Amino acid sequence: MLPHPPLRLAFLVWGLAAAFYLFGFFQRVTPASLAGDLMRDFQLTAAGLGNLSAFYYYAYAAMQIPTGILVDRWGPTRLLFAGTILAGLGALLFGIAGSMPLAGAGRALVGAAHGMAWVSMLTLVAHWFPAARFGTMSGLSLAVGTLGAVMAGPPLRWLADAFGWRGVVVASGLLALLLAIAILRWMRDDPLDRRYMTHAPRHAHPRVRLQEGGAHPPILRSIADVFGHRNALLIFLVNPGVGGAFLAFSGLWGVPFLSQHHGLSVREASLVTSAMLVMFALSGPAFGAISDRWRLRKRPALIGAGLLAGGFGAMALAPTMPLAVLVPLLLVASFGAASMVTSFAFAKESVPPHLHGTVTGVVNAGVMIGTLTQMPVIGLILDAHWEGAIANGVRQYGLGAFQLGLLFLAAWSLVSLALLAATRETHARPWDRR
């Protein structure tokens, strides 16, 4: 057998998964830049826009636990190949939809397909890269995905203005179908499949485990086992108020808030939320590397969650603060939100190896549960306090309504901070029946 795989091969396998993750992140936040177009084309209120955006998150969250279980059984390559095909078809449906139900179906299909990406990508990382680099590669993976969200900011807005939003979305769907072909050609689950040594425990490869007489536990038993571990349960509950709250603001409601109450155009507001996503992207690898270097998971997570909760809290209490103060505050909060990347290594080290895929799906579901709840709830808050103002066919909401929505996010992030404080540090060590 050959030694461990060369980095160029490891990065090729990871890069294909990361490209799909980038595509899904692009699709995830397109409603923020296309909010006006979508509200006009589909006659949507704020709650309707929140629900259209959340269709993606509903399906994404629903896929997390099944994906975690399936990746432990079938391996990531099969799931990523199927996911890219389904995501491409979903984007095509969204782009040509003539009604809200069809648009929602397209968003849901993309969300369900993209729900296979993160868990599968981290499984590939665990097999193709040394364990000591798991936190760093998790941060880099999140950064690449977040670049997709950045592309869904001003670049998408410019392309939509030039070619129409439907044409751009349809083109992205065709690119996803091409990516599926590349995954089928070059991706493999484990270096063992190319006769290299693996970086994962030998029994972590589904085929090897079955060949050596191992058996998969029942699906419900796997889920129950994950939630039976204290850290896994707490981290699942923490992520909605960290990653979820950040995505709810940067991915949808930040642009309307900034454009309606801080004198910015939609393009300028998109630049601000894109800057938040860039900060988030850059900070993910930093938190991952620091977590690996310190051999600590809890402390970096607490620092980041505290920055996010403080930033959202200050914005909720003083929503009219000058842009010269607000924008740096949003960037600090975005920096803190990226600490959620440590949660995957934290959770992985808190359960036995045969549950690694399942726990990754469970923890990622927490992020999505937060976002899919917060987006429509904020929309309901805004609609409940709407005073009848409309500009260019789009509802305008008062500052008090937005402040209530911000208070909702701030309160949730504070609860998550308290739950995080109750976790037990793993010191970057594998599970040892703690």
Image (cartoon, rainbow, N blue to C red):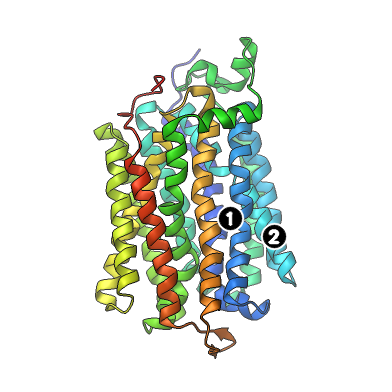
**x 52%, y 35%: residue:** 13
Q: Determine which of the numbered discs, if any, sits on residue 8 in the image.
A: none
Q: Camera-side residue: 203 or 402?
A: 402
Image quadrant in which you'd find residue 293: top left
Helix, strand or loop status at disc 2: helix
- Residue 266 visible to an observer of this rendering: yes
Split into 4 quadrants, where in the image is the C terminus? top left
Task: Report x, y in % for residue 248.
Answer: 48, 62
- Report how far apart the C-alphas of labels 1 and 2 lie in the structure: 12 Å
Q: Which residue is mark 1?
A: 57
- Mark 2 Cα-neighbour bin, 10 Å: few <14, some 14–19, many ≥20: many
Q: Which residue is mark 2?
A: 106
Q: Does 212 sit above or below residue 7?
A: above
Q: Amino acid at mark 1?
A: Tyr
Q: Which of marks 2 and 1 precedes in the sequence?
A: 1
**x 32%, y 69%: residue:** 315
Q: Camera-side residue: 370 or 6?
A: 370
Task: Report x, y in % for residue 321.
Answer: 28, 77
Q: Camera-side residue: 249 or 327?
A: 249
Q: Amino acid at mark 2?
A: Gly
Q: Does 295 sit above or below residue 27?
A: above
Say whether marks 1 and 2 touch (CB < 8 Å): no
- Mark 1 Cα-neighbour bin, 10 Å: few <14, some 14–19, many ≥20: many
Task: Report x, y in % for residue 153.
Answer: 47, 67
**x 59%, y 61%: residue:** 54
**x 40%, y 40%: residue:** 343
**Mark in the foreground, 1 or 2:** 1
